[in-house]
Amino acid sequence: MFTLSVTALTICCAGAFVGGFIDSIAGGGGLITLPALLIAGVPPHCALSANKFSACLGTCVALGTFSKSGLVQWRAALTGVPFSLLGSCFGAMLALSIDNAILSKVLVALLPPAMLLTLLPSRRDDTMAMEVSGPRLWLVLPALCFAIGMYDGFYGPGTGSFLIIAFHWILCMRLLAASATAKVLNLASNVSGVVTFIATENMFWAAGIPMAAACITGNWMGSRLAIRTGSRTVRRFLLLTLGLLFVTLVWQYFLSPAK
């Protein structure tokens, strides 16, 4: 098993803290955590397992903080979880037969409109429904969770951010409630990944445990900041996350010297 130096572990933990902070507010923390692991020299399969483990525990803390504030729409979240997991399974199977670059290049075209949505004036929270109900709950929500879950299984980065945007603009959730509710689906996906890594004895505990402590701290601080400052903070971090994903995809599939 790969061993970490003190310097490499420090880089990993710093990435986990920053990634957890961002993820708790707007999703997309893996865009920070995974590069930090790879920069530290961690092999890809070890990096994926450590990232999933730390993100799982960090998301638990953020979800608990949001839940105590009454921001999680549990009926919507629990309705969406099975469809998200089912979509993730289909996405994983699709990934075995289609080149990731195809979806990634499509995303490069779709991300600017998504970023534009975050810049538009937000719907007024006091005019939006407190709970998702009716056809939006039983028809639209499952379709959205299945589609975004499929993306998660196929590619993954930015899944939490896409959930927040979809919940806010399509399901008409308040932006902070959308961020809080998305954590339930993020957690379900992370738990599934962690169980798989542990069952196959591929969990990189040497990085996963200390990174989990850093990620928990980042999630706790980020979720408290979001609750204190409201939708303005969520919107700003959403823009940051989508921007990071856009730059990552453009570099990886259009500008990288390896191309």
Image (spheres, rainbow, N blue to C red):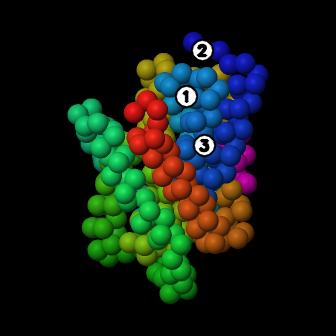
Q: Is residue 73 visible?
A: no
CB within 8 Å, label 3 to label 1: no
Image mark for residue 32: 3
Residue that appears at 73% across and 46% down: 217
Q: Determine the image quadrant of residue 26.
A: bottom right
Q: Secondary structure at mark 1?
A: helix
Q: Amino acid at mark 2?
A: Phe
The spot of residue 66 in percent (x, y) is 62, 61
Name the residue type under label 3.
Ile
Magenta range is: 212-221
Give me the residue at 39% from left, 33% from top.
Answer: 259
Percent from the top left, x then y, of residue 142?
Answer: 31, 60
What residue would you read off at disc 2? 2
* Earlier residue among tags 2 and 3: 2
Q: Quadrant of the N terminus?
A: top right
Q: CA distance from mark 3 to mark 1?
A: 12 Å
Residue 85 appears left or right of 58: left
Q: For the stretch drawn in magenta, what is the main secondary structure? A: helix
Q: Is residue 125 magenta?
A: no
Q: Which mark is residue 47?
A: 1
Say which residue appears at 70% left-offset and 25% top-offset. Answer: 8
Residue 126 vertical position relative to residue 74 in the rendered view, above or below: below
Q: Is residue 89 left or right of residue 47?
A: left
Give whichever of discs 2 and 1 has the lower sequence position: 2
Question: In the image, 80: left or right of 116?
Answer: left
